[in-house]
Structure formats: structure tokens, C-alpha cells
Image (tube, rainbow, N blue to C red):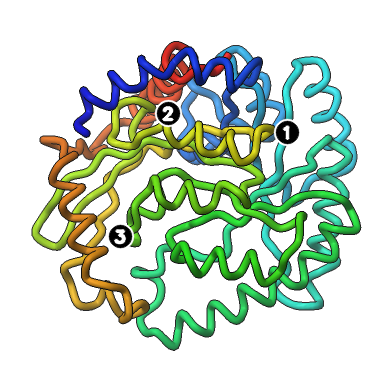
Amino acid sequence: MNRRGLLTAMLATALPLRAALGERRLGLAIASYSHRWRGKYSSFKVPPFAHALDVMDHIRGLGFGSLQIGVEGWTLDLAKQVRQTCESYDMAIEGSVKLPANAGDVGRFERELRTAREAGAMVFRTALGGRRYEVLARRADFEAWKVAALKSITLAEPVARRLQVQIGIENHKDWELQELVAALKAVASEHIGACVDTGNSLALLEDPLAVVEALAPYAVTVHLKDIAVRDDEDGFQMREVPLGQGSLDLPRMISLLLAARPGLRFHLELMTRDPLEIPCLKETYWATFPDKPGRDLARTLTWVREHRTATLPRLGELSQLALLTLEEENIVKSMATATKILGFK
């Protein structure tokens, strides 16, 4: 289905989605403000967000209903202020945490969860790795990473169970679908689930819709994003774009997730950055998954060519102000699509 067909489908499903979503508002993951957050590229005209309270003040005016944000270093005083702000603004808060690396790190992990719970956070997102085709050079490297990742999950589960919180492990261009599902089945806990990202797994030559469908029963939170694609000589490029401007079947994805987990929160994750290069036609790309079937490559490249966009703009030499303005525009456009077409309040 091309982009025009996707937009038509979105419009056709707006009313059923609105009924399924009810009074739910779209949330925002702090990565959407990767430039403005903590003054990374802030300017005088667009002041930085120093902490969660600044972000909540701003996104409330844009209509967002929840915030997913890192909780490392939070004090009890900040947590109490966040809780008061949530209650005042009728917003929810979710945390983003790093799982314990070893037994000695469990105390740090538990303190962060306890502090964030004081703010009202009962759901936390985590990521255990990066783009495996970039950061890992051999299959043995991946196996070593996997052992460490499974150990982290095992250490985290009793803490999450004791505190009665849920941890969502993101499909973060690290796990293949079946690897993540196997990890979740192995831990077999209602407190360890998935943070379902609607676009990431395309980088591992997986069908985004199939990934969402398979992870939906394990979902505890969602990163909602849209992806534009373009083929090139080494494989393809993918770029996060405002909701409705890419090639993902967002209405179908939302419906699948709600059918499996009616109470899910959805958080916009839209990083304003250059396209990511997916060099799946280079030998080095395949080093960590030599057994991946060639049909995955064929299916993905066919899909990319069917959905390709003429150009994927790069940020180039944008000034700080122009970059911050573009970041804000992308978020505002996404919110407009979310409310007018996707059914969010």
C-alpha cells in the first residue's frame, strides 16, 4: 500500500479507532526532544528543558497526556513535584531505566524504581542494546551481549515484582523478534514485558506489522512512530517522520495493540535526525545473524521499493534555532495526525 493508500485507510478507520481509544491522549517519549532536552542544542528563543517538570509544562499545552522520561538521578523531592504536576495537569508519567548490569547494581536499580514510583510511575521502558549491525562485529559478540542482557532481566524481575511495577523491554534494533519473544517467555513474568516500537525492527529486516502483532500480548507500553524509506546501493535508509507522513500502517498497529492490551499508553517517539543507513547488502551487516533467511532481505527490499520516497532530507547545516524549530514542528504535526486521524483525544 502506498502513502496515499495509507492515508485513506487512516481516515476510514478513524471512528473505530476513536471508539477503541476512548478518552486516551497520546503521550510523548523524551527522545522526541533529543535536541532540546537538557539544553543539548537549545537556544535563547527555545530554552532548554532542565528536568521533567519543564517538559510537562510544555507538552501539556500541546495536548499530550503522558510523558515517558529517564528517572536516573531523581530526588524524592523532584518525584513528589512530578506527582503533584501529574495530578494538577491530569497527566501520567512513565519512567525509562537501565536494568542492573550485575548483582552489585541491583541497589541502584531498585532506588530508581522506588523514587519514580513516588512520582506515580508504575511502567518503565528499558533498552538493552544498540544497533547490533553497527556495534557488534561477530556472532560471538552478540552471544556475549545476549548472556549479559538475559542476566540483567533476571536480576530486574524480582525487584519489579516486589515493587509491583512493569518493565517494558524495547525492540531497539538489538533483538530479533523471536529472540525477544524467547527472552520474555523465559522470564515468564507479568512484570517484564515489551516496549513495542512500531518502526525499529525494520532495520533488522523484519516486517513492522508482524513484529507489532507478535509483541502485542507482551506489551506494557508503546513507542508510536512512522518511518519513511528509500533504497540505496548498500541497502536502504529509514527516517522517522511525523505521524502519517511515512509508510507504516499505524491504524492497524494501534488496533492490534489495543486488542491485546486495552489499557496501553502510546508515546510518540520521533527523533529529528538524518536518515539511518541500513547496509543490508554489505557482508558486515550479516555478521551477527548468519542464519537469517534470504527471504527476509528480499521481502524488506521489495517493501522499501514499494514505499520509497523520492528524497529523505538531511539536516545539513541547520542553525540551532532552525533545528529546534523543526523538532517542534514535527511533534506538532504528529499530534495533529494523532487527534484528527488516528483517534486520540
Residue sitting nearer the eye, 345 or 318:
345
**Residue marked by disc 2:** 251
State which tag comes first along the sequence, 2 or 1.
1
Q: Residues within 10 Å of mark 3 (few under 14, many from 20)?
A: many
| Percent position of residue 215, x then y | 54, 52
Q: CA distance from mark 2 to mark 1?
A: 24 Å
Visible residue check, residue 249: yes
| Percent position of residue 83, x then y | 84, 29
Left or right placement of residue 144 versus residue 250 in this view:
right
Which residue is pictured at 84% across the width and 66% down the height? 158
Which residue is pictured at 45% across the width and 37% down the height? 253
How many labels, in total?
3
Residue sitting nearer the eye, 80 or 278:
278
Assign a secondary structure to mark 3.
loop
Which residue is pictured at 22% across the width and 71% down the height? 294
Quarter holding residue 247: top left
Q: Residues within 10 Å of mark 1 (few under 14, many from 20)?
A: many
Please state which amino acid type lies under the numbered disc 3: Leu
Circle number at residue 93: 1
Q: CA distance from mark 2 to mark 3?
A: 21 Å
